[in-house]
Amino acid sequence: MAALDDRVALVTGSSSGLGFAAAQALAGLGARVALNSRGGKKLDAAYRSLSAGSGEVVAIPADIRQPAELEDLVGEVEEQLGPVDILVANGGGPRVKPAVELDDADWQEAIPLTFLFVPRLCRLVLPGMQRRGWGRIVSINSVSARQPIPRLALSNALRPAVLGYLKTLALEVAADGVTVNAVLPGYTRTERQKELATALSQQTGQDPDEILAAQGRELPIGRMAEPSEIGEVIAFLCSPAASYITGQALAVEGGYLKGMP
């Protein structure tokens, strides 16, 4: 029997990148997995890829920025797979801009995408977890929550806000058998990282591939992470083996962060 047999996992933002890697790792532990994104060919491809293996998989389109769509998403997961035992909250990265250039429109766009969807989803799945006495919530965050990254002013501001919410929530629900944690990935070979390299390329004139290669060489470990390396850590935090870990923000970053833990 696998560690997560009969558990239902909802992974948002899972048509590619870190979300899909988390979904793969959870399915590998026996979970029944609900994939989610706004829909389209990428979500269809993710569903075909994951459902080709063992385990039960569904794909449900929804825009995590819209509260009504989040409610429908959770309801659809419960109808197709059962009550949500595991929530992996993953959203898109906000716009790349320095702090001095931000306006109100940038904040209004970024807050639902990077912050608000997390408490909204928790509010939907927590009551059931508490009634059943078991639950796992993991937010895919960023090292920018600990160490600001140039030009990512929105991420640098909002990622720590997510951690503050999760830490508070973890203290409130620990006695109910629900653990709440975050994973802080560093530089990882995802589409988002390529987008950031392209944005930097437009400012500096450097080739995006050269930027990515240089970022990997600068890390103490000497390379970027593969998405699967982040996904396995997320799956571990959702497993029975991590039952005594809660309220933590685990950096998976190859030594990138310079401060003490």
Image (tube, rainbow, N blue to C red):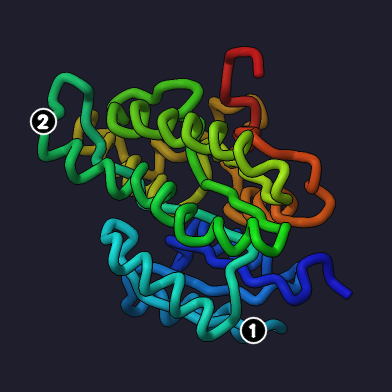
Q: Amino acid at mark 1?
A: Glu
Left or right, 155 with respect to 183, comes to: left
Along the viewing direction, whichever of 240 and 135 lies nearer the viewer:
135
Between discs 2 and 1, the one toward the N terminus: 1
Residue for point 69% across, 56% down: 235
> What is the quadrant of residue 152 in the picture?
top left
Where disc 1 sits, the SS reads loop
Whether 189 is drawn above or below 127: the answer is: above
**Tag 2's secondary structure?**
loop
Q: With 188 as the anchor, is 248 left or right in this view?
A: right
User: Residue 56, which numbered label?
Assistant: 1
- Which percent across, then down, holds residue 32? 65, 76
Q: Is residue 117 left or right of residue 109?
A: right
Q: Between residues 143 and 202, which one lies in front from this camera angle?
A: 143
- The answer to whether 261 is drawn above or below residue 36 in the figure is above
Looking at this view, is 6 or 254 the one in front?
A: 6
Query: Which of the numbered marks, if any, corresponds to residue 103?
Result: 2
Question: Pointer 1: residues within 10 angstroms few (<14), some, or many (20+)?
Answer: some
210 relative to 121, above or below: above
